[in-house]
Image (spheres, coloured by chain):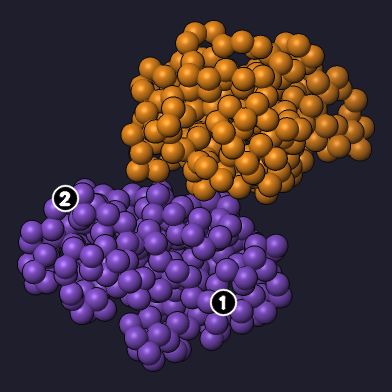
Chain colours: A purple, B orange
């Protein structure tokens, strides 16, 4: 563990609460236009299109596109289901920015401040650079660089995304630790030689819905970001 | 000018003093080994290999490589000239990191703190991500992202480097302002639609050697980073 020089992070679900954030932002944009949805169900449905949309890129069926673009495609797919066919283009563009306005889980910002004293920090998310930069501004994440899908031109859990992040910091995979609340993300990073830290976020999809323990081997498993900082001696 | 949302920066010469920094670091590494060079001449000679090395990549004669790698190639070219043939590999690797340990010109850090209140900020340098991240740590530059050559996989002044930086922020070229002390950099950015700000750094190659005025049209020309913050209302 002593050789780890950089921590790279999953962001959606691990660091920020996309579910209540997207619900809140959608309500604040569509509510005043007279729409009254089950906003949480809307956020879940939007996110529900995520894996199939990612798979289109990962399989090579469509060329790499930024997550902002993919989010818009996902939105188009669910609009009819929520009676949003008549929402106009400028509103849809604004709505798509809901993903740029998500709040961190409460213990993240201070833990990050501690962790940055000892490690280089970067997101290794499927989110694009502009999206990550806006989340960082909102939550005062102090990243050393924005790494992840847009740098690698492919989506996690493809190996190149993790390897490109380590390489951008001039580090070997074993000098880089992937931090995530999702076991599949960690196992993919581990398979190409990165160190891994599981941080539980049990409320990602609602109270007590998330993984509380890692599924598969990891180098570190902790219940919170504060515990991550402690465990890494920061 | 009101539509500008992001400032992107040249770094070597514009924000950091590479010349005295490389001289100082080289002396601190090679001096204790018994070498006594004209350290400023050594820094100048190393940097002197920059444009020819860049041109190898820009012309497509060699594939894109990070500036850290190119710096090492440049170092190999000048070693015989300075009697450094017998310096050993670990020392050469350390010496190559001199470029990661450069100091900002004195008014840069505080001006950046002011400018970030109103603009997204990123380097648009030929330096690679790890190099830019280390300079940012040392000088407390708070970048929103590290953009530039490594993102574009090509070197300035090729148009793609400026355009890829604007695109990474989801911005149009005219919403992005290139800041540099070098007219050729600014003219290349301007040619593809970016706004441009010339900041004089008259001492880049020694006292009163740098450009004091832009050669060609720019949107803004100022004598210092403090003046840039003032001019942009920050």
Alpha carbon distance from label 2 to label 1: 37 Å
- Residue at image mark 1: A107
* B132 relative to B24, above or below: below
User: Where's residue B195, x and y in %?
Assistant: 44, 24
Residue at 83% x, 38% y is B29
Answer whether residue A160 is visible to the viewer in this image: no
* A222 relative to A159, above or below: below
Q: Residues within 10 Å of mark 1 (few under 14, many from 20)?
A: few
Q: Residues within 10 Å of mark 2 (few under 14, many from 20)?
A: few
Residue at 39% x, 33% y is B3
Query: Disc 2 vs disc 1: Cβ atoms closer than 8 Å?
Result: no
- Please give the label number shown on residue A89: 2
A98 relative position to A86: left or right: right
Direction bottom: furthest residue: A208
Marks 2 and 1 share the same chain: yes
Q: Quadrant of residue A53?
A: bottom left
Mark 2 or mark 1: name the one nearer the start of the chain.
2
Disc 1: host chain: A
Answer whether residue B230 is visible to the viewer in this image: yes
Q: Quadrant of the N terminus of chain B?
A: top left
Residue at 31% x, 56% y is A97
A218 relative position to B27: left or right: left
* B80 relative to A28, above or below: above
Q: Nearer the viewer, mark 2 or mark 1?
A: 2
Total numbered badges shown on the rendered structure:
2
Q: Secondary structure at mark 2?
A: helix
User: Where's residue B68, x and y in %?
Assistant: 59, 37
User: Where's residue B60, x and y in %?
Assistant: 39, 24
- Please give the label number shown on residue A193: none
User: Where's residue A144, x and y in %?
Assistant: 58, 52
Q: Quadrant of the C terminus of chain B?
A: top right
Q: Quadrant of residue B199?
A: top right
């Amino acid at each position: 563990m002593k050789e780890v020089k950089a921590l790279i992070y999953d962001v959606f679900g691990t660091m920020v609460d996309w579910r209540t954030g997207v619900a809140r932002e959608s309500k604040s944009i569509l509510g005043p236009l007279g729409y009254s949805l089950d906003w949480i169900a809307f956020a879940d449905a939007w996110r529900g299109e995520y894996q199939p949309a990612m798979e289109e890129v990962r399989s090579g069926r469509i060329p790499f596109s930024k997550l902002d673009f993919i989010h818009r495609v996902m939105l188009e797919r669910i609009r009819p289901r929520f009676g949003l066919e008549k929402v106009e283009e400028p509103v849809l563009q604004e709505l798509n920015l809901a993903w740029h306005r998500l709040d961190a889980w409460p213990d993240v910002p201070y833990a990050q401040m501690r962790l940055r004293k000892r490690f280089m920090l970067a997101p290794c998310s499927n989110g694009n650079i502009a999206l990550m930069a806006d989340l960082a501004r909102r939550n005062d994440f102090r990243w050393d660089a924005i790494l992840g899908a847009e740098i690698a031109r492919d989506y996690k859990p493809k190996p190149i995304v993790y390897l490109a992040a380590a390489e951008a910091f001039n580090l070997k995979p074993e000098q880089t630790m992937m931090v995530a609340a999702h076991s599949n993300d960690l196992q993919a990073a581990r398979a190409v030689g990165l160190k891994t830290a599981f941080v539980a976020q049990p409320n990602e999809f609602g109270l007590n819905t998330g993984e509380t323990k890692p599924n598969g081997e990891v180098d570190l498993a902790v219940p919170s970001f504060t515990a991550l900082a402690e465990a890494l001696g920061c």
